[in-house]
Image (tube, grey):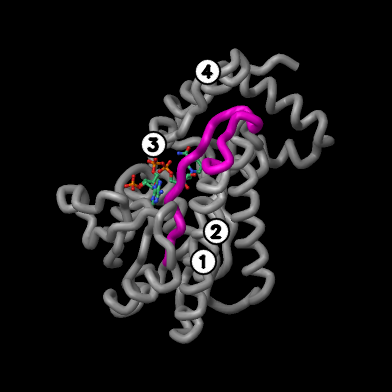
Amino acid sequence: MPKLGEVYSKALITGAGSGLGKAFSEALIDNGIAVWGTSRNPETFEKEGILTGVELDLNKERDLPAWFEHWDDQAGGFDILINNAGYGSFADFADLPSQELENQIQILLQSPLLLAQTAVRRFRERKKGCVVNVSSVAGELWIPYFSIYNAAKAGLSVFSQSLMSENPDSSPWVVDFRPADYKTNFNRNTKIAPNQSTSVAAVWNRLVELLGKAPVPEKAAHDLLSAIGKFSHCTCYSGSFFQTKIAPLTSRLFPKSLKRAILRHYFRLPP
Ligand SMILES: NC(=O)c1ccc[n+]([C@@H]2O[C@H](COP(=O)([O-])OP(=O)(O)OC[C@H]3O[C@@H](n4cnc5c(N)ncnc54)[C@H](OP(=O)(O)O)[C@@H]3O)[C@@H](O)[C@H]2O)c1
């Protein structure tokens, strides 16, 4: 099997300034791959050691395909796209402002799909490339009061699987990357509805507890590089043994009503 840096040379990563995206960037750079990393504030990148910082706000950019083509031309052709940027909105569904619902779908689903489509067109011309969609185990192990987030991540994983089905044996390769809890700025960047009920507050406290003892992002970067380095389509769960092996496997065996009850218990909600 060739080394990553022998096949790929340039990657674009959305949300590369912190958390998982930063760890992915550093791991790729360590493997000889030049990284263009996006942020809403890319000027902070210089001291972080990321090669090229590119400004991008996925909730504001009006023409993502043209944006991607511009930076692809500037870079001389990417061969890896990592759709990583994202945040969650935490609220009882009825309390979520409709603009926030739209923002969630835009950043977590519509934007990755538009970037992936533009990248796939170019990668096919070059007969080489890899598209990584950073989804979440929340797409199948639903977190209460993250309903739009859960739905968008499930949609992103189904999109990745659909792309794999359309071209099972040929590149561009697709990685459906499903992280479990990782210790990042995710909780700090979550938009939380004001005036929470006791149930919403109980789940939030549980999420803070879970992320506090979660693995560090370098583990996710290690798993992702192994997945990209397979040079084939890949579905990759990454995180603690319980959240990525035991929980998804057993939950598939349960009826949905039992699965929902177990998840309520896990997130400290009454039965
Ligand atoms: N941490 C976990 O436990 C976990 C688990 C499963 C899945 N994930 C997924 O992993 C991905 C990375 O999250 P993380 O945990 O590393 O969280 P993080 O540290 O908060 O990083 C999120 C990144 O998304 C970018 N971002 C947020 N809003 C944006 C916008 N409107 N436009 C462009 N970029 C935006 C941020 O970039 P700037 O602030 O620099 O603009 C930031 O770099 C997300 O898709 C998340 O859903 C995380």
Residue type marked 1: Leu
Q: Which numbered disc flags the more N-terminal residue, 1 or 4? A: 1
Q: Which numbered disc flags the more N-terminal residue, 1 or 3? A: 1
Asked if the residue under mark 4 is in contact with the one under mark 1, i.e. CB atoms within 8 Å, the reply is no
Asked if the residue under mark 3 is in contact with the one under mark 1, i.e. CB atoms within 8 Å, the reply is no
Q: Which numbered disc flags the more N-terminal residue, 3 or 2? A: 2
* Dot label at residue 110: 2
* Dot label at residue 195: 4
230 horizontally vs 245: left or right: left
Give the structural element (helix, strand or loop) at label 4: loop
Q: Quadrant of ligand 1?
A: top left
Q: Which numbered disc flags the more N-terminal residue, 4 or 3? A: 3
Give the structural element (helix, strand or loop) at label 2: helix
For the point 68% across and 70% down, the residue is: 165
Q: Is residue 89 magenta?
A: yes
**Can I make out residue 114 in this image?**
yes
